[in-house]
Amino acid sequence: MTSKERVYRAIERNSPDRVPVLYCNRDFEYSDVVGVGFGPSAGFLPREQGETEWGYVWEALDTTMGQPRSHPLADWARIADYTPPDPYAPGRFDGMSEQIARLDGKFVRFGVGISGFNQATFLRGFDNFMTDLCVERDRVERVLDMVFDFENGLIDQALHFPIDCVAFGDDWGTQKGLMVSLELWREVFRPRYAEQFARIRRAGKKVWFHSCGDVSAIINDLIEVGVDVIELLQPDLLGVERLAKEFGGRICFCCSVDHQRRAVSGTRDEIFAYARRLCDTLGAFNGGFIAYIEDYASLGMSEQNYQWIREAFRGLH
């Protein structure tokens, strides 16, 4: 069974020969899932280190990914002169065909990067955007339209390549629930996701959605609008058994050994037991589970724990 076949069988709950594995930031040769993405515009020249085509500047103070330190639409008066990046600009997909050709037998995941809600907050600023949701909805709609139009332009082009899914990274959860009310999420965001995911599914591709935090309130909605794989890296926040009971058999889970707890501080026995637990609960539907492995040294994960996680997921059935 090839990696591609294995991942499809897990997603479709059709008895893969073992649990597929996604490696995030190293050891890609062992990964059943391999990511590809789009590039910058051929003519883009950042004015300073970390500047993006959207106009905000990315800054990291340590070895984590960092965050934007400026927001181009923090002053709403600038909207009149603001032009978002062009998804169809030359250079976006240079070398994509050759890259995919080298991934023969792998499940190819095209990523749009940090997306949707998160990208919109980077443009407007988190506090401003959240305030706008309540008192200046027209501003929210305008910023979201920019973001989703850009993503949809990328997706429409990516679907012409032999990819297997489109992946989104949109964090919605805090430690205790959603960042907005469920009613507001359904009113503003669900319709946009539904339209976006529908264009992917019409092309016969899968939808892969990453979201950190406790997002249990929207999992059923995400299933209804077409998400095939939900990537949750803090499964303890949501409850592993609860996820299996409420959503198992209806969606495929991609989960790590919980990054906030076991992955960083767990013993070998705890890590192995946790990996087995994920497989036996979330993957108890003739599949339905993909293991996620990431070297999180930036959060204190030791090399030993990383290797134990690799070993724990290897060959699980």
Image (spheres, rainbow, N blue to C red):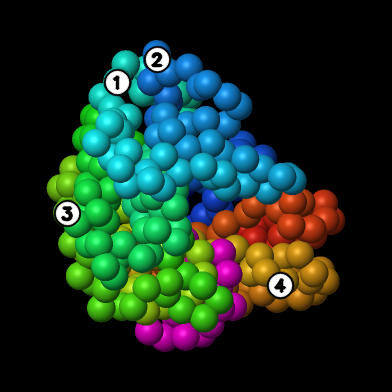
Q: Which residue type does callout 1 highlight?
A: Ala
Q: Marks 4 and 2: CB-CB under 8 Å?
A: no
Q: Marks 3 and 1: CB-CB under 8 Å?
A: no
Q: Marks 2 and 1: CB-CB under 8 Å?
A: yes
The reply, left or right, for residue 63 in relation to residue 278 is right
The reply, left or right, for residue 219 in relation to residue 273 is left
Disc on the earlier residue, 2 or 1: 2
Disc on the earlier residue, 4 or 2: 2
Disc on the earlier residue, 4 or 1: 1
Disc 3, SS: helix
C-alpha gap between disc 4 and disc 2: 42 Å
The reply, left or right, for residue 167 in relation to residue 298 is left
Q: Marks 4 and 1: CB-CB under 8 Å?
A: no
| Start-end of magenta stretch | 231-250
Image quarter for residue 216?
Answer: bottom left
Q: Decide: is 31 above or below 139.
A: above
Q: Which residue type does callout 4 highlight?
A: Arg
Which residue is at a point 33% across and 78% down the rendered structure image? Answer: 181
Of the numbered discs in the image, which one, if any, rests on residue 195? 3
Residue, disc 1: 89
Q: Which residue type does callout 3 highlight?
A: Glu
Any magenta on residue 313? Answer: no
Disc 4, SS: loop
Residue, disc 2: 42
C-alpha gap between disc 3 and disc 4: 36 Å
Disc on the earlier residue, 2 or 3: 2
Image quarter for residue 133?
Answer: bottom left
C-alpha gap between disc 2 and disc 1: 7 Å
Which residue is at a point 66% across and 43% down the rendered structure image? Answer: 60
Magenta stretch, main secondary structure, is: helix
Disc 2, SS: loop
